[in-house]
């Protein structure tokens, strides 16, 4: 449960950041095709919305801070290594791994004015506090705002369609 809670902390941070700064510098999907924008932003809203579930369950089951930290650092190393490995693999197959423009783009994405590293650091570090709770970080309204303002682009699974008899 501590591992799940740690992963969910990462995905909720990335979810919030995906829905933040839309159509401004730092919008990660600004150049994506429209269907991909919708897919990833919907998924971001979904990740943001359930960010408390695993954490609350962990606490309710008596999970302690020390154990939560132990698995948080494990997940941090594992997640970072895996994302790095997959990205390098994709760039290799794309034949763009050794292009200077790839590395310039990556450094801007990570360390630029709206770089991911700066945006992730604070909410990520918040997880190490003893009194941390997922509701303390990110926005409570970003996901709801996006889902409402793009309700014409998605439909809840199982919801009746207008043409249903
Ligand atoms: Fe999730």
Image (cartoon, rainbow, N blue to C red):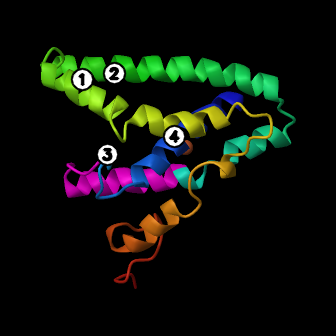
List the residue tagged with mark 1: 90
In front of the other: label 4 or label 3? Answer: 3
Find ligand 1 in the image and state its quadrant: top right
Q: Position of residue 148 (x, y in %)?
A: 44, 72
List the residue tagged with mark 4: 11
Q: Position of residue 122 (x, y in %)?
A: 57, 37
Q: CA distance from mark 3 to mark 2?
A: 18 Å
Contact (Cβ within 8 Å) of mark 1 with mark 2: yes
Relative depth, front residue between 10 and 105? 105
Relative depth, front residue between 152 and 20? 20
Task: Say the numbered circle drawn on residue 31.
Answer: none
Task: Say the numbered circle drawn on residue 28.
Answer: 3
Image quadrant holding the N terminus, namely top right
Predominant secondary structure, magenta span: helix
Residue at the right extreme?
Answer: 62
Residue 38 occupies quadrant = bottom left
Q: CA distance from mark 1 to mark 3?
A: 18 Å
Q: CA distance from mark 4 to mark 1?
A: 21 Å
Q: Which stretch is magenta?
A: 29-47
Q: Is residue 138 above or below residue 3?
A: below
20 part of magenta stretch: no
């Amino acid at each position: 449960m501590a591992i799940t809670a740690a992963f969910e902390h990462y995905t909720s941070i990335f979810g919030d950041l995906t829905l933040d700064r839309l159509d401004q510098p730092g919008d990660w999907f600004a150049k994506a095709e429209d269907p991909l924008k919708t897919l990833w932003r919907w998924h971001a809203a979904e990740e943001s919305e359930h960010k408390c579930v695993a954490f609350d369950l962990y606490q309710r089951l008596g999970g302690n801070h020390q154990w939560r930290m132990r698995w948080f650092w494990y997940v941090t190393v594992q997640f970072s290594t895996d994302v790095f490995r997959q990205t390098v693999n994709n760039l290799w197959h794309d034949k763009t791994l050794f292009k200077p423009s790839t590395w310039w783009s990556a450094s801007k994405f990570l360390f630029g004015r709206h770089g991911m590293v700066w945006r992730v650091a604070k909410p990520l570090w918040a997880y190490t506090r003893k009194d941390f709770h997922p509701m303390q970080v990110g926005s409570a309204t970003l996901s709801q705002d996006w889902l409402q303002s793009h309700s014409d682009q998605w439909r809840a699974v199982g919801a009746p369609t207008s043409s249903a008899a």
